Image (tube, helix red, strand yellow):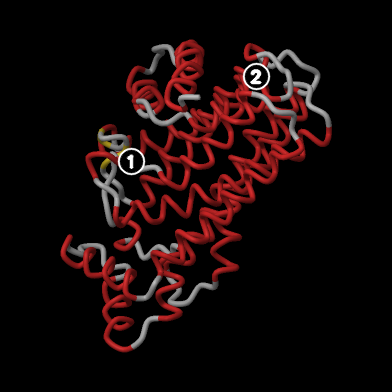
Amino acid sequence: MDLKSELEKRREIFEKELQKYLQEQEPKTLYDAVRHLPLSGGKRLRPILSIIACEAVGGKIEDVMPFAVSLELIHNFTLVHDDIMDKSTLRRNIQTVHIKFGESTAIIAGDTLFAKAFEVLHNIKTKEAIEIAFKLSKCVKKICEGQQMDMEFEKRKIVSEEEYLKMIGKKTASLFKFSTEGGAVIGGGSNREIKALSSYGWNLGLAFQIRDDYLDIHGEENILGKDIGNDIRNGKKTILVVHAIKVAKGEDKKKLLSILGKRDATDKEIKEVFEILLRTGSIGYAESLAKGYYREACKSLEMLRDSPQKKLLKEIARYSIERKK
């Protein structure tokens, strides 16, 4: 099974559906800003996961499509606002919304994407539509809680691994979990199937975020499509930093703390931090942790009947810890 072609096949179906909900409207400036990020591409991983989860339990793609679109709109709403807070200038190799359209319009565009996501859910034809809308609202609340924790951690010198995992669970893994869980619910899955796919999404989300932490400091900007080293400049307590602060000694610890949170840190200084993360074993530790969640994600799928979709979900889990962007 070729992962790329299988994902692309579903992505093409999804893109046509997404376009329907992002037509040009007035005021033009607002809707240009609304369309800017969602129509610029992206992995579409969350909607594709919901589609595959629905298929895995015997559901129809057309039934889950409004839910898939809603997930992508919510994801992009969070990105628009995150980029403002993180002062990011690039996303998917294009200007971020607030850089291109101004901060005020970007905030309203994010709010519009949020509202649109719930509007789209009205098109779910299955009896679970109200339950899905309720659970999505709870999921977004968790994302907001995670974002607040992330920002508060920037001001703290010490953050525990337990606190970090709680934060990324809310900020990232919760939407992955809901993507696969919601897809299974709409597809008519049994309680056991829904629980299995929910667990898969949760563990996948944790592994995905840990890999994201790594890529922020050691990815390639032209491949990643966004600024490299921003987590360090913003003082983010990623798992690499959390581990390094705990184990680093002497000059390494002093240097790490002096660069962490330095908004104008040079590329040379970012490279110095990366070398400290290597010396402290923090890179290897993060990789090991991500692999552990990858294994748990695959283990969650064991009770599902064998199918091409089950195999595909396992391939996506592997991709999440090996990806370059």
Which disc number belongs to residue 312? Answer: none
Could you classify mark 2 by the number of other residues whose Cα lies within 10 Å: few (under 14), some (14-19), or many (20 or more)? Answer: many
Q: Is residue 141 visible?
A: no
- Estimate the spatial distance between the alpha carbons at disc 2 and disc 1, rounded to whole Å: 34 Å
Q: Nearer the viewer, residue 291 or 24?
A: 291
Name which quarter of the figure residue 60 lies in: top right
Q: Position of residue 106 (x, y in %)?
A: 37, 36
Q: Position of residue 211 (x, y in %)?
A: 43, 51
Q: Position of residue 240 (x, y in %)?
A: 41, 65
- The residue tagged 2 is 64
Residue at left 76%, top 16%? Answer: 126
Discs 2/1, front: 2
Residue at left 60%, top 68%? Answer: 162
292 relative position to 282: left or right: right
Residue most extreme to the bottom: 250
Q: Nearer the viewer, residue 29 or 69?
A: 69
304 vs 282: above or below: above
- The residue tagged 1 is 103
Q: Position of residue 79 (x, y in %)?
A: 43, 40
* Badge 1 element: helix
108 relative position to 258: left or right: right
Residue at left 31%, top 50%? Answer: 87
Residue at left 68%, top 42%? Answer: 138
Q: Nearer the viewer, residue 73 or 251?
A: 251
* Badge 2 element: helix
Looking at the rendered structure, the kind of residue marked 1 is Glu
Looking at the rendered structure, the kind of residue marked 2 is Val
166 vs 99: above or below: below
Mark 2 or mark 1: which comes first in sequence?
2
Q: Is residue 199 visible?
A: yes
Name which quarter of the figure residue 129 lies in: top right
